Image (cartoon, grey):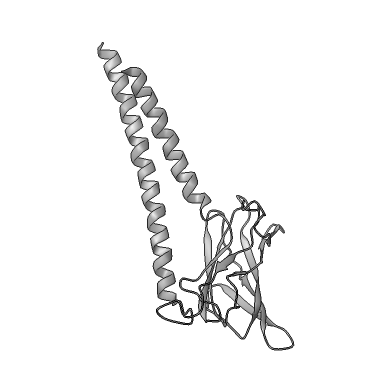
Amino acid sequence: MNSFIRRACVLAGATSLALVVGAGAASAHVSVSAPGAEQGGYTVLTFRVPTESDTAATTSVQVELPGLNSARTQPVPGWTSTVEKNAEGLATSVTWTAEPGAEVLPGQFQQFLLSAGPLPEEETVSFPAVQTYNDGQVVEWTEEALDDASEPEHPAPSLSLAAAGSSDEGHGQATVTSEATTTSESDNTARWLAGAALVLGALGAALGIGAVVRGRRS
């Protein structure tokens, strides 16, 4: 019986750690999302930028764009944005820069929204990004997926595009509301995982205490 309880405690602790670590790893890289985005359509791109450093804060992020006719940023308190265009007037990059006191601190993330289009007529579009920290560190999120389908160390944010006309709304127009809903669902999942980890940890502790009490009585 005591052997079973010890195994249960070890399993509960290991499961709790895996859940917490897994929830954090899922959002560790700079990423882009746009529900319902279609080839040749307009959408709202949401760039999620986490600070992976334990000692420095994110001060800016630059994202390359595939030559877009339209690229409009949503204001972010404490941040300025600049859209660069080429000689043809197409948007080729956007840079968000933090004002003093608005940096993304360790353990935090920030989201930057960009209304953009029309998107390329391709199944997948990449948005290479450069993240800068206040200690001078620069991380280039520019690597493409490897031939063996494994994820590189610093993958470029990429977005899968549906074929034109496949969405009920048409033209891949994802609204800020739908993105907020997706983010909320992701946050709820993370909270559920963390809660499950705490419950399992408490169960392991309770089983351990019960074993000690029974041992003393015997």
**How far from the left and from the top, in percent, is residue 72?**
56, 82
Position of 177 compared to 70: left or right? left
**How far from the left and from the top, in percent, is residue 50?**
56, 59
Residue at image x 34%, y 22%?
4
Compared to 4, does 155 lie above or below?
below
Q: Quadrant of the N terminus?
A: top left
* Quarter of the rendering containing residue 88: bottom right
**How far from the left and from the top, in percent, is residue 117?**
57, 82
Compared to 205, does 98 lie above or below?
below
**How far from the left and from the top, in percent, is residue 183?**
43, 64
Asked if one can make out residue 40 in the rendered structure from this viewpoint, the answer is yes
Q: How many marks?
A: 0
Q: Quadrant of the C terminus?
A: top left
Asked if one can make out residue 77 in the rendered structure from this viewpoint, the answer is no
Residue at image x 31%, y 30%?
206
Please tell me which residue lies in front, 43 or 123: 123
Compared to 106, does 68 lie above or below?
below
Please tell me which residue lies in front, 165 or 150: 165
